Image (cartoon, rainbow, N blue to C red):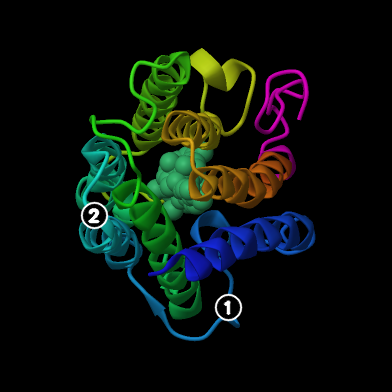
């Protein structure tokens, strides 16, 4: 990677985020409860999640290594997130998950190569000498607090959803308690907060572009999930918002 390609990469991601936000309000990505026929061959969700998410930390590591190996703390945070998402989460899914079209998995792989490259490059090429690019700056501490809080919420919500099913079950129930009192998708909220924290402490454009894309990707999906809950369960709490308590 070189600086020109990097610039193109993060700017392109901002454009993609804006396009995704508009597009995904009209069209629902076909996986999980929104999987439907007509999307070609599918693979088991567990395999899909493993393959598409394992790509990200591998590509990040290669780009970081090649760019100069600075700010190793960013590499650690990236691995903390993707190590869980690729190597733990898929193997804990109840019922193995719904089939995932190849096209969904392939587009996630393309995105993860793109995102891992620009973020790994930005981290490795940083001029920082310590573990994190901004050193003891308040943004480092605020970013770490957001990253940790977002990750905790994301893991907690994943576990709460998992507990709604017994072994081998594939149906759905209304999640309740904790943050589910206010929003239908606290897992997505946690994920967004996590990457906002990462962007803040990393201080580079690629981090902000990824945080923007995460919001653009997950906010419309959270809305779709909430609408689906309302259509499916007449007793679903009417006041529960999709993603942001009382607002969205
Ligand atoms: P979902 O909330 O749709 O599903 C998560 C898991 O919980 C699935 O196994 C799902 O089963 C199960 N589940 C969900 N709701 C219920 C319910 N009401 N009753 C029983 N089981 C339920 O999340 P996603 O699959 O979209 O995402 C998984 C993780 O990946 C999330 O933590 C998310 O934040 C992250 N992610 C991040 C993205 C990013 O851009 N950074 C993009 C997409 C996801 P089933 O599959 O059968 O529906």
CB contact under 8 Å: marks 1 and 2: no
Label 1 CA crowd tier, 10 Å (few <14, some 14–19, many 20+): few
Q: Nearer the viewer, residue 108 or 160?
A: 108
Q: For residue 88, which quarter of the picture?
A: top left
Inspect the magenta stretch and tell me whether residue 238 lies in it.
yes
Q: Where is residue 233 shown, x and y percent of the image? A: 67, 37
Residue 18 marker: none
Q: Which residue is mark 2?
A: 68
Residue range corresponding to the magenta coloring: 229-248
Label 2 CA crowd tier, 10 Å (few <14, some 14–19, many 20+): some
Inspect the magenta stretch and tell me whether residue 91 lies in it.
no
Q: Where is residue 39 shown, x and y percent of the image? A: 56, 81
Q: Where is residue 232 shown, x and y percent of the image? A: 67, 44
Residue 37 marker: 1
Residue 62 vs 240, above or below: the answer is below
Q: Nearer the viewer, residue 204 or 88?
A: 204
Q: For residue 26, which quarter of the picture?
A: bottom right
101 relative to 25 in the view: left or right: left
For the C terminus, the image quarter is: top right
Q: Residue furthest bottom?
A: 40
Q: For residue 9, which quarter of the picture?
A: bottom right
Residue 186 vs 38, above or below: the answer is above
- Provide the secondary structure element on which disc 1 rests: loop
Q: Where is residue 242 shown, x and y percent of the image? A: 68, 33
Q: Is residue 108 visible?
A: yes
Q: Residue at x 61, y 31 (%)?
A: 184
């Amino acid at each position: 990677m070189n600086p020109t390609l990097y610039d193109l990469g993060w700017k392109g991601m901002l454009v993609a985020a804006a396009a995704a936000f508009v597009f995904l309000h009209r069209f629902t990505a076909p996986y999980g409860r929104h999987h439907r026929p007509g999307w070609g061959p599918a693979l088991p969700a567990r395999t899909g999640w493993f393959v598409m998410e394992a790509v990200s930390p591998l590509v990040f590591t290669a780009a970081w290594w090649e760019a100069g190996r600075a700010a190793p703390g960013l590499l650690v945070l990236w691995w903390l997130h993707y190590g869980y998402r690729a190597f733990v989460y898929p193997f804990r899914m109840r019922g193995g998950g719904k089939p995932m079209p190849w096209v969904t998995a392939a587009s996630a792989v393309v995105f993860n190569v793109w995102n891992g490259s620009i973020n790994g490059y930005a981290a490795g090429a940083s001029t920082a000498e310590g573990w994190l690019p901004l050193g003891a700056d308040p943004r480092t501490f605020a970013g770490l607090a957001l990253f940790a809080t977002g990750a905790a919420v994301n893991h907690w919500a994943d576990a709460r959803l998992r507990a709604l099913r017994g072994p081998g079950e594939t149906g759905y129930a209304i999640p309740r308690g904790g943050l589910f009192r206010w929003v239908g998708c606290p897992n997505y909220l946690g994920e967004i907060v996590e990457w906002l924290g990462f962007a803040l402490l990393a201080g580079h454009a690629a981090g902000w572009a990824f945080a923007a894309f995460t919001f653009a990707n997950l906010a419309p999906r959270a809305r779709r999930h909430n609408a689906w809950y309302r259509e499916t369960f007449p007793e679903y709490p009417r006041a529960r918002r999709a993603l942001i308590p009382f607002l969205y």
